[in-house]
Image: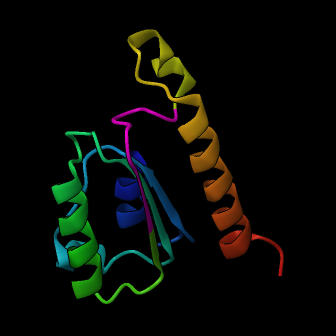
Amino acid sequence: QQSLLLSLADPRMKATVIFYGGLVADPFELQKLQGPVLGVFGNNDKTPSPSDVEHFKEALQTAGKTDVTIYQFDGVGHAFASKSAAKMGMYNPDKAKEAWAKTWQWLDQKLGKK
């Protein structure tokens, strides 16, 4: 959520990666995004829920954002990719490894040296 809010507030942000958290679904606000967007979400999450993610995708599309990649992982919820959430039983090492691999690949593709 913080990365999304920062990207909305600061036009110098070249890309936005969101791992769960609250979402902005106002197309007018989302027009402020300057670069590609990657979202990583668990389908068992309640904040954001799969429905929230769908509204986010629709709002991005309405805002004219076409460079958007959304990954939604089955069987995991909030904080599934955070080792610090292991104490609460939320961390899923297999899904986390997959999510982080996809994220680093995306970042390299979008921001890597040309």
| Residue found 61% across the figure and 56% down from its top | 103
As for residue 65 lying within the magenta part, the answer is no
Q: Is 14 placed above or below 85 here?
A: below
Q: Quarter holding the C terminus?
A: bottom right
Q: Residue furthest front?
A: 75
Return the x and y of residue 31 as percentages of the image width and height: 30, 81
Return the x and y of residue 2 as percentages of the image width and height: 38, 46
| Residue found 45% across the figure and 33% down from its top | 80
Is 23 positioned to the left or the right of 79 in the image?
Answer: left
| Residue found 42% across the figure and 63% down from its top | 7
Rendering quarter of residue 29: bottom left
Residue situated in front as seen by the camera: 79 or 23: 79
Return the x and y of residue 89 as percentages of the image width and height: 41, 16
As for residue 78 lying within the magenta part, the answer is yes
Rendering quarter of residue 4: bottom left
Is 11 positioned to the left or the right of 112 in the image?
Answer: left
| Residue found 69% across the figure and 56% down from its top | 104
Q: Which residues are magenta?
A: 70-81
Q: Residue furthest top?
A: 87
